[in-house]
Amino acid sequence: MKYIIVILFLMLNVIRAQEAPAVQVISRSLPEKVLLRWAVDEPSAWKKANEYGFLIERSTISRNGLAVIPIERKVLVSVPLKPEPLEAWEALATQEQNAAILAQALYGDSFETSVPGGAMGSIYAVNDELEQRFTFALLAAEQNYEAAKLAGWAIEDTSVKAGEKYLYSISVAIPEEVTLTIENGSVYAGSDLYEELPKPIGLTSSFGDGFVTLDWNFDLLKGIYTSYVVERSKDATSFEQLNGVPIFSAQESNNTKEISLSYTDSIPNNSTYYYRIKGKNAFGETGPSSEVISGMAEQKLEYAPRIYKKEIPTEDEVVLFWDFDPKGNDLISGFEVRRSTSNKGPFEIVKSAIKAMDRETRIMGLKRVNYFTVVAMGKNGVESESFPTLVQPIDSIPPAPPIGLKGVMDTTGIIKLEWTKNLEEDLGGYRIFRSNNPELEYSEVTQTVLKGERYTDTLQVKNLNREVFYKITAEDHRYNRSKYSEVLIVEKPDVTPPSSPVFKNYQVTEAGIQINWIPSSSEDVVAHAIYRKRGDDNEALWEQLMETNKISDSTYVDTSVEQRGVYNYTMIAKDEGNLESTPTESLSVVWQGKNMDGEDLKFSGMVDRELRFINLSWRVKDQEVLEYRLYRGKGEDGLKLYKTLEGSIKGYNDVDLEVNTNYTYGLQSVLSGGRTSMIQKVNLKY
């Protein structure tokens, strides 16, 4: 018996995919010609298009790699293409079924189908006669290119030239007085675009008792092949086609599920057969054959053992009992017992050559977990296997303690634990225990046995504990628990910034501004930093003056202040996690500038007897002077204030003099804030 499972053709995938009717067109570029195929994608519009006919226009858009400007246009038909008269179909329709179906769909007085069961039902189940004509006409044209040309839905352009590329436009010749709209279809082609048809790939086979099922992926080459033929051979040389009609897809493709095609062939057992497939496209071309696959159908063993009882007399042995229909005794050579540590296998032979008449056997050397099957060994090499049965001897030995426990906690409180997998065959899983104090009792965080070697826990990060402690145990299927693993210490990430330092006092000294503070009280503080900015500048930014890693430091002298004015200071503390405290409340200090010493003011004088004056000059180092006070004394008289001069003046000529008199001059600078320098003196004789 043969089964054909069909699953659709390229053109049907777009039917009803658009709201407005349109011409759908495909092409095949050959070395000396271009083949075109088209169809209208809506039944009523399809019927009208057959009545009005189709126009084909070719636009030459490039020649030898260069754009053709202006584009050269050519109409390939002098009159609209319409279906040929019925008598023109007779020769082809008598030879090919698809041509007959297409002629009946176009010209038949009636077109009725019944809906059979099975896979073809989706093709036949259409709503009315017009849709039936439409559907079967497109399907038949897809299978026979010559019939498509008779229907006016295909054309061969043999006037193509090498090096030229074309854009073909297919339109319906709708009369001007008709309001129907059918969108044009277009396709890009040219003889230089020729590609050889590819081999079908992915052919697989499954041989059973008296049959083989072939499967292959339709989606992989659905843009090239619309149907397939299956060929069979007994000698891998001479092949014959099996399917009378091509196998195609009657299922709409979607992006989530691949479409497969399959074919089931009935064959005798114990003979090797060879299979291959070939793809056919919408232009009547048949591609190269796929790779050949082969195999042999074999008779199945109709009877299978069934283990119905097991006895465990000691911890190291088991007696298995099974049923097997006596009618199968003559078909088998005996039994085998196979074992695995999992019901899914793989199974290994633990006892063979058990007689065909036996229905029980004793197995020694049990493991902690044993899955046994009894296999009937057919004389023809075919096996029949029982379902697995679990055998576990009395077990009081716990698994080994887990090793390799490690973990890490992130800033959100998520802890990820992992460890090395235990190797016991009967391992059931693990249990995890946690504590905030290793000296106190641990609580279990897994309420059931955990499968796998990873666990995710969640804790509050912001609490008083800096660490959390974990240990785990392993448990087997008999609920024997191992000893605890080694304790794992997981450090919590630091998400709490340190407390802020506090300014204690300050002092304005000759050297600068001395700041004293109380360090941060947090235990994990690693540094303190001081920042400064000018208080009279609203746009000024904080600049770091210093950072000290000595936690005991509590004094800093700012010697970098130069201009007088208000200076603001603030501080932060940093911890081991590089978190910063809130800045301290700003400290404002008024700086009047440094006091002047003797080296900051240079004062000198010179006597000019010809012009009768004494020239006094001075120079000040890096100070802003508001005014100068000039003192003078004669002989033994003390100094008295003589003149007051502006701070910008750098000299003075004294002309109020007496001959042969000793003069003593003194100069004092007055700075901002009323600060004054020491009086610098100079003695001169006039």
Image (spheres, rainbow, N blue to C red):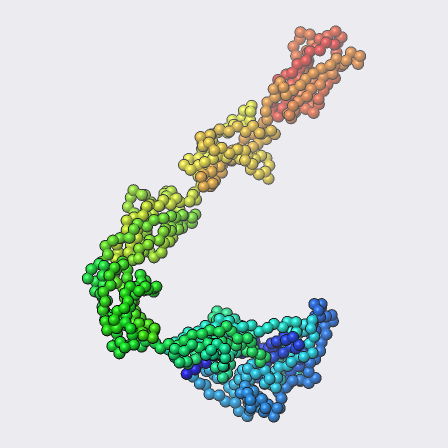
Quarter of the figure with residue 109: bottom right
Of residues 293 and 308, which is closer to you in this image? 293
Q: What is the x, y in percent for residue 41?
A: 57, 79
Query: For the point 69% across and 18% down, which residue is it?
Result: 643
Image position of 206 with respect to 106: above or below? above
Q: What is the x, y in percent for residue 525?
A: 44, 36
Query: For the point 50% across and 77% down, which residue is it?
Result: 237
Count of picture labels: 0
Image position of 611 with respect to 273: above or below? above
Query: For the point 72% across and 20% down, which residue is it?
Result: 651
Image position of 251 with respect to 444: above or below? below
Tell whether 520 sits left or right of 667: left
Quarter of the figure with residue 76: bottom right
Of residues 463 and 677, which is closer to you in this image? 463
Tell whether 295 sits left or right of 479: right
Q: Quadrant of the C terminus?
A: top right
Of residues 326 and 625, which is closer to you in this image? 326
Q: What is the x, y in percent for residue 128?
A: 51, 86
Query: For the point 35% across and 53% down, which residue is it?
Result: 421
Q: Is residue 250 visible?
A: no
Q: What is the x, y in percent for residue 592?
A: 58, 27
